[in-house]
Amino acid sequence: MKRLKSLLGILILTLCLFGTSCGGSTPSKADFVLYYISTDDNLTLVPVDYKRPAENEDLSARIDEVLKVLRTAVSGTKSCLPPMGGVELNGFSQENGAVILDFGKDYLDLGKYEEISVRAAIVKTLSQLEGVETVYFSVDGDVLTYSGNNSAGAMKAESFADISANSLLNTKEAKLVLYFSSEDGGELVREERSLYYRSAMSPERVVIEQLIAGPEESFSRKVIANGTKLLDISVKEGTCYVNFDATFAKGAPLVSPEVTIYAIVNSLVELSNISKVQISIEADSNVKYMETISLNQAYGRNLDLLKKAK
């Protein structure tokens, strides 16, 4: 906290260079936003409107532009701090959609919640750039680790689920095991994902939202139709009840119905409090998903469709 707040003096000398100044946590409707960090004790992420970097520019040039701006303080009705302002960046590289940011060792001096807020702000900002698929952090060439030597790994905006307008002090950390579809749509592919989410959210809701967002690996497919909304989810006596809107019934393109159902079931059953899953569409379970799988019963774990390692 001290490292971030020590930057506050910069704000007095700096003019607001953006479309809107740092304000409250009202979601921005701008085409592109920069994520800054509030100066209060909650370390809230604050979106600041910014003109999207020209897409005709080289991706490295656009990344460089954004990183430089994230070092610049802004002033306004509610002050906020630049996420890059308190840490040294040795450099960055990008290839095939992956961006690697290498920081100096002073990055490791950040407190737990400061580090989460800095990482979330940078990743959520860079993820808006066309051509950026994942972001990695390293410190003096070594992969960033946290919480018991866990690697931060590949990160996307979704790695920091729904925390932009909420206190980062009220977040939980999760390591999820999710299942998506193979490229041919006929098998399950296992994917591990680490993320932070609001403590008010249930783990099962986080799982479904991550499935809706889709896989991080390029060789996997989404298992839930684009535009699907989760209407309700609850757990009772070990059974998770998942209610989707009507869009779910359309199915994910090129993915077999069995793969979709068991991707959802297996992902949820990875949670310790869930052993079975029952799915409904608009609160109706007396239907067959894609005219193939009846939803009038709860399903348990089934790894028969899991793709075998070669």
Image: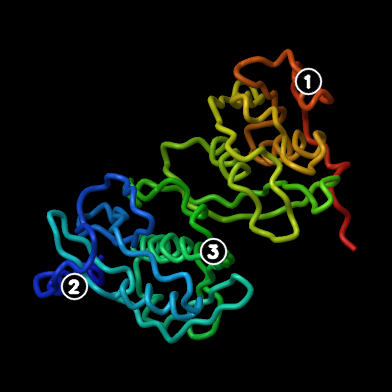
Q: How many labels, in total?
A: 3
Residue 79 in the image, given as x and y percentages of width and height: 17, 59
At label 1, the amino acid type is Lys
Res. 150 visible in picture: no
Q: Is residue 237 left or right of residue 26?
A: right
Q: Are marks 2 and 1 in contact (CB under 8 Å)?
A: no
Local packing at callout 3 (Cα closer than 10 Å; few below 14, some 14-19, many 20+) is few
Local packing at callout 1 (Cα closer than 10 Å; few below 14, some 14-19, many 20+) is some
Q: Quadrant of residue 230?
A: top right
Residue 10 in the image, given as x and y percentages of width and height: 15, 74
Q: Residue farthest to the front?
A: 56
Q: In this picture, is 260 found above or below 283?
A: below
Q: Secondary structure at mark 2?
A: loop
| Closer to the camera in the image, 125 or 62 | 62
- The dot on residue 6 is 2
Q: Is residue 42 left or right of residue 152?
A: left
| Closer to the camera in the image, 143 or 288 | 288
**Is the N terminus in the top left, top right, bottom left or bottom right quadrant?**
bottom left
CA distance for labels 3 and 2: 28 Å
Residue 64 in the image, given as x and y percentages of width and height: 41, 79
Point out the tag, 3 or 1, that comes first from the N-terminus: 3
Residue at x 54%, y 41% (from the top left corner): 206
Q: Residue farthest to the left?
A: 12
Residue 89 in the image, given as x and y percentages of width and height: 40, 82
CA distance for labels 3 and 1: 44 Å
- The dot on residue 201 is none
Circle 3 residue = 148
Circle 1 residue = 288
At label 2, the amino acid type is Ser
